[in-house]
């Protein structure tokens, strides 16, 4: 579970709920408009169907799961695992790593080690794993694009809802019906509010978080790739560790060097 995402959701929901309750004095239905929901909600959904292929849209639950949960190994876990594997390979030979493959929870690292143990050429290992990284990067871009589209067009549909509400309000001026004018004005204002919330409190943050997670996962897999090639080449474990430490901030390197 991504604790930071959960904390952010709770804080944002609590702040919005408190403000809504205080402003409406408990009458939260004041902020509900079916016309606004249809315009902003359905309008935003229509945009992603127009802009993205169906195969990408079928993966939306996976995008949300990636946002809420941490997937794969983080940098610290990668370095710890590589250090253990490198020491064992140096001491007992690379074939001794074969029983360790089943214990590795990251399929990318496991697949790369299997190729190294099987004696696949380093250039082929590098090419195969880099294609895997590129494919993963493409999948991640699709997830971020989904939420970026909602972030971009949600406020636009909110503006459309505002204009529709204003047209309705102007159309009621001749009757001088205060209730009808107020209803049309409420539609106009609430539609804008829905668009702002969906862009700035939902789609925007989720898309940004997915982008950050994608970058971290790509970096971790690059670390794994360099580790696999280093282990296959028979490098000293300290050399392999130095290659891993090159991927993390210098302030965190001393901790790993002290533990080595």
Image: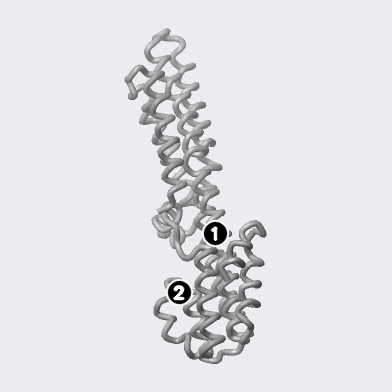
**Which element is circle 2 on?**
helix
Quadrant including the C terminus:
bottom right
Who is closer to the viewer here, 208 or 156? 208
Q: Position of residue 155 (x, y in %)?
A: 53, 36
Q: Quadrant of residue 242?
A: bottom right
- Residue ID for mark 2: 107
Quadrant including the N terminus:
bottom left
Q: Residues within 10 Å of mark 2 (few under 14, many from 20)?
A: few
Q: Is residue 37 left or right of residue 132?
A: left
Q: Residues within 10 Å of mark 1 (few under 14, many from 20)?
A: many
Sequence-earlier tag: 1 or 2: 2
Q: Position of residue 177 (x, y in %)?
A: 39, 9
* Residue at x-position 42% and y-position 39%: 41
* Residue at x-position 43% and y-position 52%: 2
In the figure, 188 relative to 134: above or below? Answer: above
* Residue at x-position 49% and y-position 21%: 166
- Give the farthest residue toward the top: 176
Q: Position of residue 23 (x, y in %)?
A: 41, 18
Q: For the residues marked 1 and 2, what is the alpha-carbon distance in whole angstroms?
A: 17 Å
- Residue ID for mark 1: 214
In the figure, 143 relative to 97: above or below? Answer: above
**Which element is circle 1 on?**
helix
Q: Quadrant of residue 222?
A: bottom right
Q: Position of residue 19 (x, y in %)?
A: 42, 24
* Residue at x-position 42% and y-position 55%: 69
Q: Which coloring applies here?
A: one colour
Q: Is residue 176 left or right of residue 153?
A: left
């Amino acid at each position: 579970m991504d604790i930071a995402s959960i904390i952010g959701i709770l804080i944002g929901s609590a702040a919005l709920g408190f403000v809504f309750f205080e402003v409406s004095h408990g009458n939260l239905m004041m902020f509900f408009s079916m016309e606004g929901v249809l315009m902003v909600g359905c309008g935003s959904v229509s945009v992603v169907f127009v802009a993205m292929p169906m195969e990408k849209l079928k993966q939306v639950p996976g995008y949300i799961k990636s946002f809420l949960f941490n997937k794969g190994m983080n940098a610290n876990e990668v370095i710890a695992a590589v250090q253990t594997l490198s020491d064992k390979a140096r001491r007992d030979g690379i074939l001794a790593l074969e029983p360790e493959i089943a214990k590795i929870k990251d399929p990318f690292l496991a697949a790369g080690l299997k190729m190294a143990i099987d004696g696949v050429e380093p250039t082929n290992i590098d090419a195969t794993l880099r294609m895997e990284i590129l494919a993963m990067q493409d999948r991640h871009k699709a997830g971020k694009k989904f939420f970026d589209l909602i972030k971009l067009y949600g406020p636009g549909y909110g503006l459309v809802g505002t204009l529709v509400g204003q047209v309705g309000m102007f159309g009621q001026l001749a009757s001088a019906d205060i209730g009808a004018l107020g209803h049309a004005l409420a539609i106009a204002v609430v539609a804008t509010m829905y668009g702002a919330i969906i862009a700035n409190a939902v789609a925007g943050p989720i898309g940004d978080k997915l982008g950050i997670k994608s970058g971290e996962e790509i970096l971790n897999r690059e670390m794994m790739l360099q580790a696999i090639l280093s282990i296959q080449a028979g490098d000293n474990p300290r050399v392999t560790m130095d290659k891993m430490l090159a991927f993390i901030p210098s302030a965190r390197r001393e901790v790993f060097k002290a533990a080595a």
